[in-house]
Every structure is written in C-alpha cells, then in structure tokens.
Amino acid sequence: MRALIISCLVAISFASCKNNDKPATASDAALKDSANFTSIQWLDSTNKDFGKIAEGQKLEVSFHFKNSGEKPLVIASVHPSCGCTVAEQPKEPVAPGNEGLIKAVFNSEGHTGVNHKTLYVFANTKGTQESQLNFSVIVEKKKW
C-alpha cells in the first residue's frame, strides 16, 4: 500500500512539472524573445522625494516613460518592495514613440518615519529587463 501511495505521488509531481518551459503569459514571452526587445526612456527622475506627509495619508506616485525603441514596449509586471504599496502598469503594449505611466499608491498607515520604497519594473527592454523606480517619503505620526 505504501509503495502505491509513493508511486502516485511521484506520478503527480511529474505531471505537475510538465510544460514548465512554456511562458505563462504573453507578457512573460515578451521578456524572453530578444528579437522583440526595445528601449525605455524615463521622462522624469527614477528617484523621487516626496517630503513629509501625515500618517494615514495615501501617497500617489507616478513615473512617466517613453518607448524610445522600434518595437512595442511590454511592461510585463511591476512589483513594489513591500505590501504597503500597490502598483499599476499599462495593460497594453506601448507603441514605439508613445508614452505611458507606471502608477503606485503608498499607504502610510503604520509607517511613521523615513520610508524608501522601490518599484521593480519588468519589461522587454534591451540590456536588462528590470528597471528600478525609487521614492522616499517621511511619514509624520498622527497627532491625537
């Protein structure tokens, strides 16, 4: 009986590993096909300082970019460095010469003091497929 259970578990694990070499989405595929890599130009600073805000305030952040290459720019994903920041990326590819925004919202509740946050942007760009966008803010404790 024990051998039968182990055999079933091994078979299930092999079946679950099947086709792992295929990209999960079209965005993932864009990151792997160097023939379709392009260039991104950040139109404002990739390091922003927002000064002071009150605890509990939600800070909206945006980074403006341009597809400076010759192929459509696919922003595959944007990952914030922590759960207190939620990022939004363009849903559709950005045509050559066109511009777009990476947006994020930082929730300052419970984050008093100096905060340095990073957005990791993964796109089909030449050289490296990862860009880092940074922002800092000082969150002042609520006054009761």
Image (tube, helix red, strand yellow):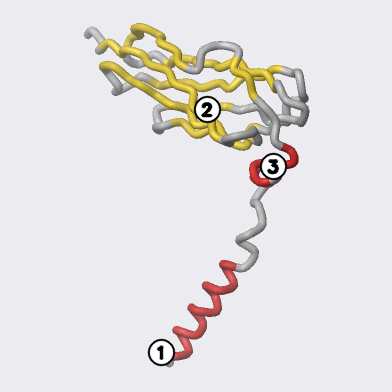
Residue at the image point whose x is 39% and y is 13% from the top: 57
How far apart in space, not on screen, are marks 1 and 2 (Cα)? 48 Å
User: Which residue is disc 1 drawn over?
Assistant: 2
Q: Is residue 58 left or right of residue 102?
A: left
Residue 24 vertical position relative to residue 16 in the rendered view, above or below = above
Q: Is residue 25 left or right of residue 137?
A: right
Q: Nearer the viewer, residue 95 or 15?
A: 95
User: Which residue is disc 3 drawn over?
Assistant: 34
How far apart in space, not on screen, are marks 3 and 2 (Cα)? 26 Å
Near mark 1 (Cα within 10 A), the count class, few <14, some 14-19 or many ≥20, is few
Is there a contact, CB below 8 Å, between mark 3 and mark 1? Answer: no
Is there a contact, CB below 8 Å, between mark 1 and mark 2? Answer: no
- Amino acid type, mark 1: Arg
Position in image of residue 24 (x %, y %):
64, 51
SS at badge 2:
strand
Q: Nearer the viewer, residue 79 or 31?
A: 31
Position in image of residue 44 (x %, y %):
56, 11
User: Which residue is disc 2 drawn over?
Assistant: 87
- Tell me the quarter of the picture where residue 100 sits: top right
- Amino acid type, mark 3: Ser
Residue 12 vertical position relative to residue 139 in the rendered view, above or below = below
User: Is tag 1's residue or tag 2's residue first in the polypeptide sequence?
Assistant: 1
User: Is tag 3's residue or tag 1's residue first in the polypeptide sequence?
Assistant: 1
